[in-house]
Image (cartoon, rainbow, N blue to C red):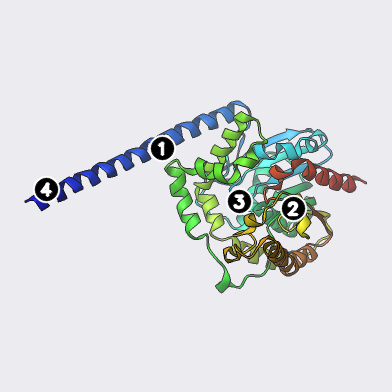
Amino acid sequence: MKIKKVFRVIGKVLLILLLLIVLLFLISTTIYHVKLKKVENQLKDEGFYHPVSVGDHALNMYTCGKQDGQHTIIALAGWGDGEMFLGWRQMTEDIEKENLLIFLDRAGYGLSDDSKQNMTPEQVVEDYRTALRNEGIEAPYLLMGHSLGGLYATYWESKYPDEIEGVIFVDGTFCFEIPEDEQLGGGMIAALMPIVEKLGFAPLVIRSEYGEFLDILPEDQQEQAIYLMSKTLGASAPTNEMGKVDWDCDFVWKAMQTTDIPKCYIEAMFGYHTKEDFINDGVKAESLLNVYVEPSMKDSGDDAIYEEALRLIKQRRTERAVPYYEKLGNCEVAKLPGDHVIFLDKPDKCSRIIKEFIDRLDS
């Protein structure tokens, strides 16, 4: 009898703990979604919301800069970057003075509607083109894509070269051949992020990964950016994108046509050429583990870690970057060692490179 009583007590304790965990999840979920709604309403009141229909969903289009500017620049976000119209602005502030700048979010990003569609490069680019056409914004366009946005820019300028006067790749995704049996899916991260977001824990993930970079934003916009990125990570369309990045790289590589369209690639993560580049940028050897170098090298010493990182960067540059640049055609490379979110890491230097490229277009 005593044993049964012990088990009953343990069962009740476990049940109480389970109920407390469920209650915690409910509280977290409620607080998150209330806060997210508040942030969305703030951004709408501040003029950042302008939905443009592309069929069964609408893309958010935020326009700024000079209405009759020298160029119409279309900003294309990297994967998960739902706060582009906030986070890019220190990089684009000077560029906006003489150009029309359009932040065009994809399905599921920021304030855009979500979509269950298959986010192939063809579909994404057609959504972009439809939104611009429906809004009466005419070509030629100067594309400016970060990370995955660079992949879409590559497909766009290859498929519709007459619409594009130039392309700026801000540490864009390299396109290269990946055999089907070597293509990886989104894995556990793609499966878990929608759950993490729905439970209200995504802001914690964003703060831990990007908090130091988002500090450059005004305090109120830091919170807005975190919640927009959190919402984006939980949406269907970005999840679909993450599950097929390798397929997209291979598809666009095969679809690419070499063009004479002027292009500038800002090389950040692959911009490190010497140990001094790392040291001058404040990059400690231990931070290269899991990014460039296998964790097993942890006890090999700083010099060995730096050397291995540089070897791998050189190898990737030779195998992927250089063939990509050559196939693009007319592509200049600006080396700016830094984090992948270089527009947050070194916005002023990015801005200078972009302005100089635009000036050369006009000369």
Hey, which residue is sitting farthest top in the picture? 45
Kindly identify the residue that appears in the image at 76 percent across and 33 percent down.
65
Kindly identify the residue that appears in the image at 64 percent across and 50 percent down.
78
Between 251 and 199, the residue placed more toward the observer is 199
Q: Earlier in the sequence, mark 2 or mark 3?
A: 3
- What residue is disc 2 on? 279
Figure label count? 4
The three-letter amino acid code for the residue at tag 4 is Lys
- What residue is disc 3 on? 79
- What residue is disc 1 on? 28
Between 60 and 343, the residue placed more toward the observer is 343
Disc 3 packing (10 Å; few <14; some 14–19; many ≥20): many
Is residue 179 left or right of 337 when viewed as pictured?
left
Q: Nearer the viewer, mark 3 or mark 1?
A: 1
| Element under disc 2 | helix
Kindly identify the residue that appears in the image at 53 percent across and 63 percent down.
185
Measure the alpha-carbon separation of dots 4 and 2: 63 Å
The three-letter amino acid code for the residue at tag 3 is Trp
Between 159 and 82, the residue placed more toward the observer is 82
Q: Earlier in the sequence, mark 4 or mark 2?
A: 4
- What residue is disc 4 on? 5
Q: Nearer the viewer, mark 2 or mark 1?
A: 2
The three-letter amino acid code for the residue at tag 2 is Ile
Q: Where does residue 248 sit, x and y in percent of width and height? A: 62, 62
The three-letter amino acid code for the residue at tag 1 is Ser
Hey, which residue is sitting farthest left in the picture? 1
